Amino acid sequence: MRLSAKTQYGVRALFDIAFHGGGGPIQAKDIATRQEIPLRYLEQIFQDLRRAGLVDSRRGPRGGYSLARAPEAIRIGDVMRALQGPIELVVDGPGSRGAMWQELARKVSACFDELSVRDLCDRERTRPGGMYFI
């Protein structure tokens, strides 16, 4: 299993909206600056996240992106599936499709589904130093 840069950036962007948004929309350029994500790439990521129902967008001077659901309802597994497809283990060789590997893949997927965007924000608020953990 590999987390793509797209998925890592997507998680960071959703974290940023939840952490800094206060319920209102945030402009992509502000998220890109804080999270050090190329703006054009972030806009592509937001298209996928919007299609998956994870973010809403609003145009105009007071526009931007906001979470489509409460932060506790957005699971990291949701973000991963939206941006890189099903959560799978990549195992090569004889027996790689066996029941043990399938069970392990289910458990890894469950771990990502246990962690929400709210959890990331709560962890950041209790972290000393003020630097983002992501």
Image (cartoon, rainbow, N blue to C red):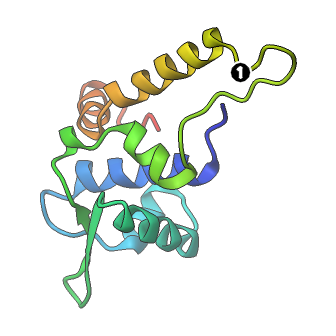
Crowding near the residue tagged with mark 1, few <14, some 14–19, many ≥20 C-alpha atoms within 10 Å: few
Please tell me in which quadrant of the rendered image residue 104 appears: top right
Quick one: 68 or 30, which is closer to the camera? 68
Question: At 38% across and 44% down in the image, what residue appears?
Answer: 78
Disc 1 marks which amino acid? Arg
Please tell me in which quadrant of the rendered image residue 114 appears: top left
Question: At 61% across and 39% down in the image, what residue appears?
Answer: 3
Residue under circle 1? Answer: 97
Marks counted in the figure total 1
Vertical order, 101 against 10 (above or below): above
Q: Position of residue 39 (x, y in %)?
A: 52, 72
Q: Residue furthest right?
A: 93
Vertical order, 106 against 87 (above or below): above
Q: Residue furthest left?
A: 23
Q: Position of residue 80 (x, y in %)?
A: 48, 44
Relative to residue 97, is residue 105 drawn left or right?
left
Q: Is residue 128 visible from the viewing direction of this image?
A: no
Quadrant location of the N terminus in the rendered image: top right
Q: Is residue 109 visible from the viewing direction of this image?
A: yes
Q: Position of residue 21 (x, y in %)?
A: 20, 59
Q: Position of residue 15 (x, y in %)?
A: 34, 47
* Helix, strand or loop at mark 1: loop
Question: At 23% across and 64% down in the image, what residue appears?
Answer: 66
Vertical order, 117 against 51 (above or below): above
Question: At 87% across and 20% down in the image, what residue appears?
Answer: 93
Please tell me in which quadrant of the rendered image residue 125 appears: top left
Q: Residue furthest top?
A: 100
